[in-house]
Image (spheres, rainbow, N blue to C red):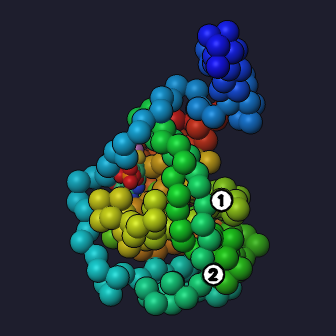
Amino acid sequence: MTDKDKLIAAKEKWARDGRGLTGEKAAPAARRLPPGQRETFDFPVLDLGDQPNLSTRDWSLSVGGMVENPIRWDWETFMAQPQTELVTDIHCVTTWSRYDNAWVGVAAQHLLKIVRPRKEARFLLLRSFDGYTTNIPLSRFADDDVLLAHSWQGQRLSREHGGPVRAMIPKLYFWKSAKWLRHITFSDRDTPGYWELRGYHGEGDPWKEERYS
Ligand SMILES: Nc1nc2c(c(=O)[nH]1)N[C@H]1C(S)=C(S)[C@@H](COP(=O)(O)O)O[C@H]1N2
Ligand SMILES: [Mo]
């Protein structure tokens, strides 16, 4: 490539990436990095400091509240469900974003088919083995890119990143993606979780900069 070709290629890439745009009014499809975020290449660990040491034998997921069919899945039952592979970007409210994370897990849409939320159910509260909680509108949990994930980049999720199983909700800030997932409650009412009680947003859409309430 000549220098001129390189310059053109670089400028074309800038256009594709939307470099230099504030992005404040840009539609999500027009850019990849939500407003106020910067790309990171490592995978930071963020939690309350108590990382449960769970073997797959200690782990189970129960789902209850306003559903027709409450369940409790142990590890074998969870792994026997249809498995979904997805590549998604992570956006943490502390302003780092990490692109192209390859996940494997059970799709939220599959879980919803099994438990069948009642008509009145509009919110979920996720509870974790470290006592952490976070709330999510059912409409956001029902998205086709939401997973209960057990693997990341071809390996089982490590303890520090929430293994054996964590939520993965890529269109919301990452604090909504509960690690060490233990229980999901469906409700007609919104119950604020750990960070939501401490000034963070109920929905948490990075494209709308829903950081704080
Ligand atoms: N159980 C549990 N899940 C949690 C947290 C936590 O403290 N406990 N922290 C949340 C926050 S604030 C973020 S940013 C992400 C971080 O996930 P990571 O440590 O895998 O990067 O997990 C979320 N899920
Ligand atoms: Mo976070």
Which residue is drawn at the image coordinates 69% and 15% (left, top)? 5
Residue marked by disc 1: 145
Q: Nearer the viewer, residue 111 or 67?
A: 111
Q: Nearer the viewer, residue 207 or 87?
A: 87
Q: Secondary structure at mark 2?
A: loop
| Residue 55: % across, % down | 29, 80
- Dot 2: few (<14), some (14–19), or many (≥20) neighbours within 10 Å? few
Residue marked by disc 2: 82
Residue 127 location, quadrant: bottom left
Which residue is drawn at the image coordinates 48% and 48% (left, top)? 174
The type of residue carrying mark 2 is: Pro
Q: Which mark is residue 169?
A: none
| Residue 97: % across, % down | 48, 38
Which residue is drawn at the image coordinates 74% and 30% (left, top)? 30
Residue 77 as seen in the image, left or right of residue 109: left
Q: Earlier in the sequence, mark 2 or mark 1?
A: 2
Numbered circles on residues, count: 2
Which residue is drawn at the image coordinates 34% and 82% (left, top)? 56
| 87 lies above or below 200 | below
